Amino acid sequence: MTRLSVRLINQGIKLYFCGIRHPQTQGKVERFHRTLEHAVRHHGRPSTLTEWSKLLEFFLNEYNHIRPHEALSMDTPNQHYQPSKKVYNPNPKTWEYPEGSIVERLNTRGWLGKSRTRYFVSEALAGQQVRVEQVEKKLIVSYRQMYVREIDIITGKSVSLLTPIN
């Protein structure tokens, strides 16, 4: 997880992850990356951050406002853009986990302390309250509406989950 992921979750946005370079699930993103890669080759690879900034600004303007897209009946993305109806909340309210939940606060490095043992959950969640469910010999850790980590109590090994809770 990243701090951006945490901020999005705090806004009530459900995150869905999939494999990279997997056009079946990320077709639009992969196509955008291919177009960007072509533009970089065409204009030349920048060597400074300032040059990258100028190239990206030029590319995004052309991509969104000038270049027609076949998938949009030869319109530009800007012609179809509509702002989100969701309003950003700079101070999201404290999350209420279901009654009877075991709620723990992660330490300043994102670790969970359980029975004199510490388990890593996520640095991005440092200091946050998470829900901990024990299922057989595993701990399932969730943050708000997302499962974030599965921890094997016996081996201490953990797996990132990052899946929405239905």
Image (cartoon, helix red, strand yellow):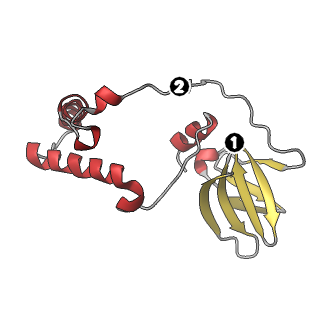
Q: Which residue is mark 1?
A: 127
- Check disc 2 and give the amino acid type: Lys
Residue positioned 58% across, 39% down in the render: 13
Residue positioned 80% across, 43% down in the render: 97
The answer to whether residue 137 is above or below residue 83 is below
Q: Which residue is mark 2?
A: 85
- Check disc 1 and give the amino acid type: Gly
Q: Quadrant of residue 156?
A: bottom right
Helix, strand, or loop for circle 2? Answer: loop
Mark nearer the N terminus (2 vs 1): 2
Q: Quadrant of residue 135?
A: bottom right
Residue positioned 35% across, 60% down in the render: 23
Q: Nearer the viewer, residue 159 or 85?
A: 85
Q: In the image, residue 94 lies at what x, y percent?
A: 74, 32
Q: Nearer the viewer, residue 132 or 24?
A: 24
The answer to whether residue 51 is above or below residue 109 is above
